[in-house]
């Protein structure tokens, strides 16, 4: 028979049945506990019950590392996801066992992150990662779990950034950095390519006035037209023995860009804002939505709209 006790941490459910060791778990609601008890007692009655307490006692910390070494390592964005996993590993929730994490734990973690000032989009991505870890644990590692993240409300998504370069900022950046950084900024503004696409460029991919990207973030190839300014910038870059154009690593470049912005007193500007700027300039040059989409590599028009903010003054000129 199952025994139900109300505690501060939730509902404590204890099952005692002849021929089986006593088992117990804690749930957020009594209804959850009742469903679990009914399932366990039914399996005990038919002889199909398997004691899963050893699996459920594995710390989330171990699951995070297993996921990193078996799933994350195969992804293109492995470095970024590893950084996110390391943040999870440092959280106190990682010390809990995988079977003891409840919806209320996730909700409390979410609320604390938002209260600390973390962007809602970031919190949502962190939750998505944890949810996928539970999904993999259930479907591939055969853990007898329910995914506690699925029932927890996602944080409100912050409005998309509309930061563009203000008058004089481009010149300020270009006159206060080294040649490689200068070249990157120009290529980013002229082509709307992603940071990783620019840093991964190779000489052999530049053919005439087009950069041929064989494998992008969206797992597709793309052809990016190059302006005269972009072509000249690429030609001015020194030749490298390995055939690459830039020596930066993606993560180190982002930090270097932020240091440059601080050096010249430019506030609230990051590397990805250069892509915003580039897409907006393409529209201001008269290209239509499908043309810009083909250049930028956005999957959908809706995604492209999030990264495009046209200059109102230039739009006003079109009306007259």
Image (cartoon, rainbow, N blue to C red):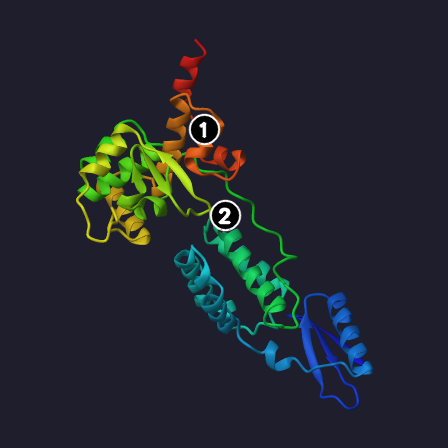
Numbered badge on residue 121: 2
Q: Check disc 2 and report its element: helix, strand or loop.
A: helix
The image quarter in which residue 287 lies:
top left
State the residue position of label 1.
Answer: 291
Above or below residue 5? Residue 125 is above
Above or below residue 268? Residue 283 is above
Q: In this orientation, which residue lies closer to the viewer: 82 or 282?
A: 282
Quarter of the image that includes the N terminus: bottom right
Q: Residue at x 43, y 13 (%)?
A: 318
Q: Residue at x 54, y 73 (%)?
A: 96
Q: In this orientation, which residue lies closer to the viewer: 231 or 149?
A: 231
The image quarter in which residue 193 lies:
top left
With 239 as the anchor, is 318 left or right in this view?
right
Q: Residue 146, can we see it?
A: yes
Q: Position of residue 302 (x, y in %)?
A: 54, 35
Q: Position of residue 269 (x, y in %)?
A: 34, 39
Q: Position of residue 156 (x, y in %)?
A: 56, 45
Q: Position of residue 215 (x, y in %)?
A: 41, 48
Q: What is the C-alpha distance between the residues marked 2 and 1?
A: 28 Å
Above or below residue 225? Residue 219 is below
């Amino acid at each position: 028979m199952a025994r139900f006790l109300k505690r501060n941490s939730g509902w404590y459910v204890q099952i005692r049945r002849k021929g089986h060791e006593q088992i117990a778990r804690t749930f957020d609601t009594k209804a959850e506990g009742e469903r679990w008890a009914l399932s366990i007692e039914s399996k005990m009655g038919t002889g199909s019950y398997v004691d899963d307490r050893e699996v459920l006692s594995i710390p989330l910390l171990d699951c995070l590392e297993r996921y990193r070494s078996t799933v994350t390592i195969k992804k293109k964005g492995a470095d970024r996801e590893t950084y996110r996993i390391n943040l999870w590993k440092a959280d106190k929730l990682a010390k809990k066992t995988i079977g003891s994490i409840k919806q209320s734990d996730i909700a409390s973690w979410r609320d604390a992150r938002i209260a600390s000032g973390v962007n809602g989009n970031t919190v949502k991505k962190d939750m998505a990662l944890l949810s996928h870890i539970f999904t993999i644990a259930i479907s591939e590692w055969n853990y007898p779990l329910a995914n506690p993240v699925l029932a927890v409300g996602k944080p409100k998504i912050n409005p998309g950034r509309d930061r563009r370069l203000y008058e004089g900022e481009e010149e300020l950046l270009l006159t206060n950095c080294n040649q490689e950084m200068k070249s990157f900024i120009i290529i980013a503004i002229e082509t709307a390519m992603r940071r990783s696409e620019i840093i991964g460029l190779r000489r052999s991919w530049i053919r005439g006035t087009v950069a041929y990207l064989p494998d992008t973030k969206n797992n597709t190839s793309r052809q990016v037209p190059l302006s005269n300014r972009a072509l000249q910038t690429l030609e001015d870059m020194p030749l490298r023995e390995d055939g690459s154009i830039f020596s930066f690593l993606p993560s180190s470049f982002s930090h270097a860009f932020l240091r440059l912005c601080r050096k010249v007193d430019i506030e609230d500007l990051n590397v990805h804002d250069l892509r915003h700027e580039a897409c907006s300039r393409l529209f201001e040059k008269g290209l239509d939505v499908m043309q810009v989409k083909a250049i930028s590599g956005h999957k959908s028009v809706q995604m492209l709209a999030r990264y495009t903010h046209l200059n109102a003054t230039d739009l006003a000129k079109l009306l007259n």
